[in-house]
Amino acid sequence: MSYKIVSWNVNGIRAIVKKGFLESVAEMSPDILCLQETKAQFEDAKTALSLLSGYHTSINYSKARKGYSGTAILSKEEPISVTQDMGLEEHDQEGRVVTAEFEKFFLVDVYTPNSGSGLKRLDYRETWDVAFLDHMKKLEAKKPLIVCGDLNVAHQAIDIARSKENYNKSAGYTQREIDGFEKYLAEGWVDSFRHLHPEEVKYSYWNQMFNARARNVGWRIDYFLVSKQLIDKVKEADIYNQYMGSDHCPVAIDLDV
């Protein structure tokens, strides 16, 4: 079975549908589409996503704050099961996790919390990383696991245009966040893009305030992490920076299982 899986932080589903989103998705033609930062409550997200026909849709949304965060998985194949969140009240208020089970793998769509301006949320982010790793391990104990989404961390200097200026100063590039990410790798998950493209410089996020995308001053913070028993089945991993409409671009893998 072949799957093309696309992940995209859309920075507001209702906004991006006015910016060529439907045409972009049609062109990419994913079998599974994972979205982050939908910024919509359930009914609003459902209405916007209903414009994409032919998909089974699973939505999570922020309970703590309207129009914030939010995730969704759309799949042509109906999942065996779908769950929202991690079962932890502390981490389940912002609609950041959707997990879909398919025959050969689990797929987790995640929007990892940003540590925020002044790193004021870094302590919380560390507790999230620990809890999310535990969630991953519990799932992988049952079958192989793919995690995709905006993980809000640039892993290495190759993944960020201005590494020295941002290191330990900017959310998403502190050693504490990097350490959290490296714990995923230490447990055996593989960064599919870097595995297949070890030296390629390509970004998936650009700050909108500084015309950064036009200058390609970006960050690679959107990932597909794949169980090691699946990595040889990933035929390609892509960053589609030709698609506009958000401050992130889509990332994707082609999987044969």
Image (tube, rainbow, N blue to C red):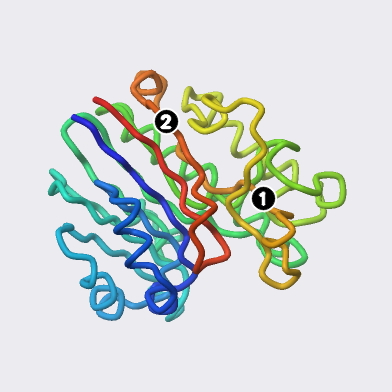
Identified by mark 1, the residue type is Trp
Q: Residue beneath label 2, please? A: 236
Rendering coords of residue 15 (x, y %):
44, 78
**Distance Cα–Cα, label 2 vs label 1:** 20 Å
In terms of secondary structure, where does tag 2 sit? Answer: strand
Identified by mark 2, the residue type is Glu
Could you tell me which quadrant the C terminus lies in? top left
Judging depth in this view, the residue of 210 and 131 nearest the camera is 210
Rendering coords of residue 154 (x, y %):
66, 44
Could you tell me which quadrant the N terminus lies in? top left
The vertical placement of 36 against 110, above or below, is below
Image-based side of 256 in relation to 217, left or right: left
> Closer to the camera: disc 2 or disc 1?
2
Q: Residue beneath label 1, please? A: 219
Number of on-image labels = 2
Rendering coords of residue 164 (x, y %):
86, 45
In terms of secondary structure, where does tag 1 sit? Answer: strand
Q: Which of the 4 image quarters holds residue 50?
A: bottom left
Rendering coords of residue 6 (x, y %):
37, 48
Judging depth in this view, the residue of 134 and 66 nearest the camera is 66
